Amino acid sequence: MALLHKLLSGIHFPKLCGIQDAAQCFLLGSVFTGYPSRLYSSIKKTEAASGRSSPEGKTHGGLEKQTKSEVGVDLISPKEKIEIDFDKAIRAEIKDHFKLLMKELVGRWTGPECRPLHEVLLENTRVMWQFRSNEDLDKWLVTSDRTIGGRSKVFLKMASNNQSALFYGILNTEIPHDGETQRSGYCAMTSRIPRGAFERKKYHDWSNFNTLYLRVRGDGRPWMVNIKTDTNLIHKSHHLYSYFMYTRGGPYWQEVKIPFSKFFFSSKGRIQDNQHPFLTDQISSVGFTLADKVNGPFYLEIDFIGVFHDPTHTEEFAYEDCKKICGNF
């Protein structure tokens, strides 16, 4: 940063007095447009605070009436110093995090997730994710076998009506020629882990619910619905609780309800003998995976993802515990 400051201070900018300097202005403009956007914005803020206008605005009177989007790049006089206060920016960032932390602490007095306790107790259904704008897409990550050298393609965008998200792409099961990979051909989308003050990991509390509720429209392919819990421990980073979702294709939406008791436990893609239910108060993310070994295009349209409490479902866990079975012998 010090080298950049010295470089900018030593550059002499000619005055824009006529057409003969147009070539010089063009070259200088092309150089300055390559600088980082943060530095450029900080320079603009410094000029606005000091009340100075750019040399372009002083020389060409017609440009003074133009908007910021019409004016190219403001040139800085060699006598003007670039003022960048990093300490002030850091203090502002820390202040925002402390405000967020105070909000979290005060919200604990009212009820879980900063909500009134009576609302939490009477709540029967909750929408966790819905897709109505591009901001909702930022809460998700998309991956494919390209991370291991595969050739599948995957995309995530808003549908044409801005009322749902479209997860689509091309599945390719061709194995990369690296001599190590033995399987390929998968695409997935996963929700981002919620963050609190100072980038702490937070978790979704689904203790009052027992069923995952989805409204989707697919192409007839089988999908794997994944739930990931606490990821603070290294040996739990590859743990997943999964269940199959079969889409029927066609133009009609389908509502999928999957009880929590149906999700089976797996680690690094292998179903474990020791099965147990997941902790419903430590949910970190939810995801969808396609790996049906069928090459070709796919799509999955999602309206919303929620949870609800089904009073008729009393099953605690659908699978046998290997330890309990072996302990009887």
Image: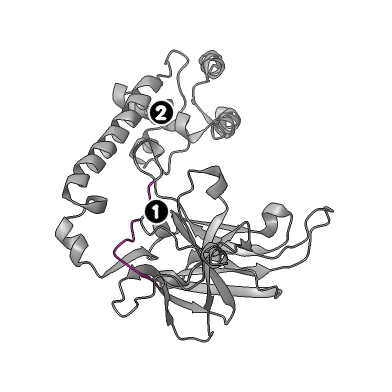
Q: Earlier in the sequence, mark 1 or mark 2?
A: 2
Disc 1 or disc 2, which is closer to the eye?
Answer: 1
Indicate yes or no whether the magenta region holds residue 187: no
Indicate yes or no whether the magenta region holds residue 208: yes
Query: Looking at the image, which is closer to me, 21 or 40?
Result: 40
Answer with left or right where residue 231 lies relative to residue 20. Answer: left
Where residue 174 sits in the image (x, y, percent)?
Answer: 78, 65
Query: Looking at the image, which is closer to me, 151 or 206?
Result: 206
The Cα atoms of the two marked residues, 1 and 2, are separated by 41 Å
Contact, mark 1 vs mark 2 (Cβ under 8 Å): no
Callout 1 environment at 10 Å: few (<14), some (14 to 19), or many (20+)?
Answer: some
Which residue shows up at 39% across the image and 75% down it? 315
Q: Which residue was labeled with disc 1?
A: 282
Residue 238, relative to residue 127: is it above or below?
A: above
Callout 2 environment at 10 Å: few (<14), some (14 to 19), or many (20+)?
Answer: some
Residue 4 figure quarter: top right
Query: Looking at the image, which is closer to me, 87 or 36?
Result: 87
Residue 102 visible in rendering: yes
Q: Which residue was labeled with disc 2?
A: 42
Answer with left or right where residue 119 lies relative to residue 151. Answer: left
* Mark 1 element type: loop
In magenta, the rendered stretch is 202-212
Where residue 118 sits in the image (x, y, percent)?
Answer: 15, 60
* Mark 2 element type: helix
Residue 285 figure quarter: bottom left
Where residue 241 sits in the image (x, y, percent)?
Answer: 51, 63
Which residue shows up at 66% across the image and 69% down it? 170
* Amino acid type at image mark 1: Gln
